[in-house]
Amino acid sequence: MKNYEQMAHDVLTRRDAEIKRRRRAFLIGAPCAAAALVGVVGIGTAVASSNRGKHINLAVTTAGSGSAADANSGAAEIADTLRADDSSVSSETAIDVPEIGSIDIATEDDPPVSDYTNPNVGQNDIKVLDIDEFNIDEKPKDFSGDTFVEETLEELDRTYGLRFDILGQLHPDWELSYDKLGIYYHDSVNHEFATRGLICSRNTLNYTTSSGAKITVSAQYEVFQPISDERLTYMKPNDPSKYKEETVYDDEGNPIGILGRPIDPNDLGEPEPDEGVSTVNGYEALIYRDADGNFLADLDMMPAQVRITAEGLSEEEFLNVLDSFTR
């Protein structure tokens, strides 16, 4: 027969993937909140002693956050899961979970999963621009003396504000490869103050589909080298005639610079999109096809800029890739 520590470890391990995917809230009745906390402390001790390396934080809120039916359903689910762990557990050792207010379960070293759902799905205006070749001539950068901070794929999601490996998640049969993942920073000391400036934030994922097609996805904060004279709107300056220059002073009245302020706060002189700019699920994009039938798309997914290339895909297949990535 398993003791409470083994039971808690097995159950929480089995439910770990579900906890990470969505932080489930179980509704419980306020009168038994204290009893629930006692049970939770016991489970937390079991987790710590089982070397899972994570702590469980519980935030109890007031009653009335859900219906009684929801509360009974959540409590019953936990109790059934615990009892199902071992058919030999007797009624004396089975754990009953009382009905309480509302608890939010989250692991301390695993930040809440962000919701990257795009509310603009379906807003599309596709224009594929034909070009002879993708003339990309980027010189290698020297990062000697800079600091590299490694990041996981999940951490890069939060860095870029998008689902960086969504194609791999949607197509687990695709082969994925990449170099080291992370961000380069440059540390310096200026007037006795230590500063850290971002040097390079580009990361690239390489996919090989089941049919042998090659797809790359690159993301970074910086601007990608343009492929043509067409420009995404964020790369174009505002109309300078809509602004007036004002001198900026420090606290002691010394001029420290000149700042452009809009003459009319309701007219910022924002540029119009170029004729060749597409819209993919609400995001601006420039989509190109070269003479060999390869594709390249630059997408403005602020705060990140994304470049996706493909070899061996039809136009429809490439547009499906863009649609999947931007949803």
Image (cartoon, helix red, strand yellow):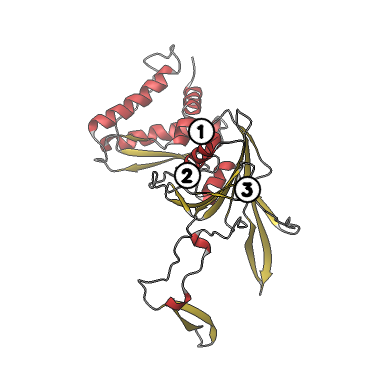
User: For this rendering, which residue is in front, 107 or 44?
Assistant: 107
Taking the spot 41% from the left edge, 17% from the top edge, the residue there is 84
Q: Please, is residue 267 above or below residue 44 in the view?
A: below
Q: CA distance from mark 2 to mark 3?
A: 17 Å
Query: In the image as oriented, which residue stretches furthest toward the top?
Result: 88
Amino acid, disc 1 = Leu
Provide the secondary structure element on which disc 1 rests: helix
In the displayed structure, 316 sits above or below 276; it is above
Give the residue type at disc 3: Asn
- Cα gap from disc 1 to disc 3, whole angstroms: 20 Å
Quadrant where the C terminus is found in the figure = top left
Q: Which residue is label 1 attached to?
A: 170
Question: Would you say the residues marked 1 and 3 are in contact, meaning their CB atoms lie under 8 Å apart?
Answer: no
Q: Is residue 110 left or right of residue 265?
A: right
State how far apart marks 2 and 1 are (Cα): 13 Å
| Residue 241 spot, x, y in % from top left | 45, 78
Disc nearer the start of the sequence (1/3): 1
Numbered tag placed on residue 203 in the rendering: 3
Q: Name the front one of labels 2 and 3.
A: 2
Outermost residue toward the bottom? 253
> Could you tell me residue 302's position as x and y percent?
49, 55
